[in-house]
Amino acid sequence: MDDPNVMADLIYVAIRVTTKVDYRTVKKLLTSGVISSYRDLSDFGRFKDLSGFGIEKGSSLADKIESFVSKESVIKKVASNYYEIMQKNNIYTVSSLDKDYPYNFRMQSGMPQVFFARGRRELLTHLNTCGSACCVGSREASKYALYAADRFSSELSKQGITIVSGMALGTDRSAHYGAIDKPGGTIAVLAGGCERIYPPENKDLYEELCVKGLVISEMPPGMQVLRQYFPSRNRLIAGLSDCCMIMEAGDISGTLHTASFAASQGKDVFVLPNSIYYDNAKGGMKLLADGASVLLSPDNVIDDVMQAILYRRLECPELFADTAMPVSSAFRGSEILRCRKKADLEPEAMSDDEWKVIIKDELTMGPKNIDELCRVIALPFYRISRLIVSMQCSGIINDENGKFTLTIV
């Protein structure tokens, strides 16, 4: 194998699959200084003498280390088997140490250090800079939901937003096909190995995704698709996306799991409105009752994704080092970004209305008092005060115990 990092990735995955070494064990090894990254687990020799790292013989951590070191030959054989399957199926690894590892994965706990992919790797960089939305729903969706999945995915992908789904029948299939030939592209997250086509009826879609889109899985090559893997797959669908679109969901469905993961990760959930008398829409109705947003237009999602990209650009500018602006035409037209950029370059040329756009954007992250707004926006107190009074008179913001909140977002 030419790249030692790939074998280190595969050995790490083999260790996780064949031994009791879990995420907590790896974290302990990192904090204790035994390893500097998970790839060091492939160097079995470094674990022969743990006394220098302060790990007592007979401790649970020492026992776990000895357990996987004793299985070195088995682990390497499993890793070699993964590699053979990868070679036959054009599968590659993506590591948390790679530049194009998804930003949204980095921001969430419990995401895989290594996952497997097949298809257009550049889509990973694209979704980091141009945003993504997952589109999920029933496998036995109504024509209405299938039409909406296709239309919303198509319109959003035209704007450069990547559509993420699970390659299931019904809604997922419509979402992938709606986006696959558009600028944003589409990514399918699988519950088994990347070479496992499930369901078999989607063989045509899978083959197109491997050429025009991207297929990913945290499961190693050769891993069968099992029922218990789907909740984990759904967590990755939500984790990869900036927001979540629910087209149709019954009372009990994997779609609701995806929505739950998205909400717990701090993502907005949008639900396509449907009839209250339609059983396959009752799950979506419950989500709306619990505070999900109504999905009325692609603009709902575009605004949400563009805001996520803006924060990503401010927090992690190195992601955008190779592009002056994100590719998305929707982002180029973002009023928030335009005002932010102008405030940085020509603050003296900013109008009151443009400063109000920035104040509103700051308040979407939570209530703030005037001192906090002065600090984050870098305007003098008298100027912020005048703008705040104007916004209060217009009914845009409220004063709650000295902190301002939005009434109109």
Image: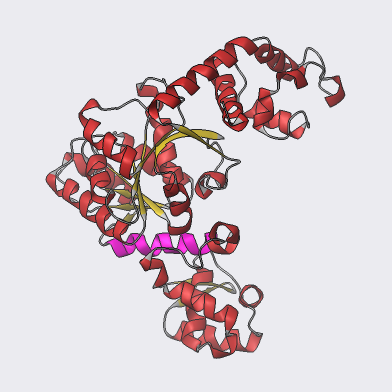
Whether residue 43 is visible, yes or no, is: yes
Q: Nearer the viewer, residue 399 or 352?
A: 352
State the image coordinates of residue 397 (x, y, percent, origin top left).
47, 76
Does residue 282 appear left or right of residue 396 in this picture? left
- Residue drawn at point x = 48 percent, y = 61 percent: 309
- Residue drawn at point x = 26 percent, y = 46 percent: 175
Whether residue 398 is visible, yes or no, is: no
Q: Nearer the viewer, residue 4 or 259?
A: 4
The quadrant of the rendering that contains the C terminus is bottom left
Name the magenta segment's main secondary structure: helix
Farthest residue to the left: give it: 143
- Residue drawn at point x = 64 percent, y = 79 percent: 378
Q: How is the image coloured?
A: secondary structure
Is residue 13 placed above or below 174 in the rendered structure?
A: above
State the image coordinates of residue 101 (x, y, percent, origin top left).
53, 44
Is residue 56 placed above or below 359 in the rendered structure?
A: above
Does residue 145 appear left or right of residue 166 in this picture? left
The quadrant of the rendering that contains the N terminus is top right
Q: Nearer the viewer, residue 281 or 297?
A: 297
Is residue 163 placed above or below 407 in the rendered structure?
A: above
State the image coordinates of residue 8 (x, y, percent, origin top left).
61, 27
Q: Which residues are magenta?
A: 298-312
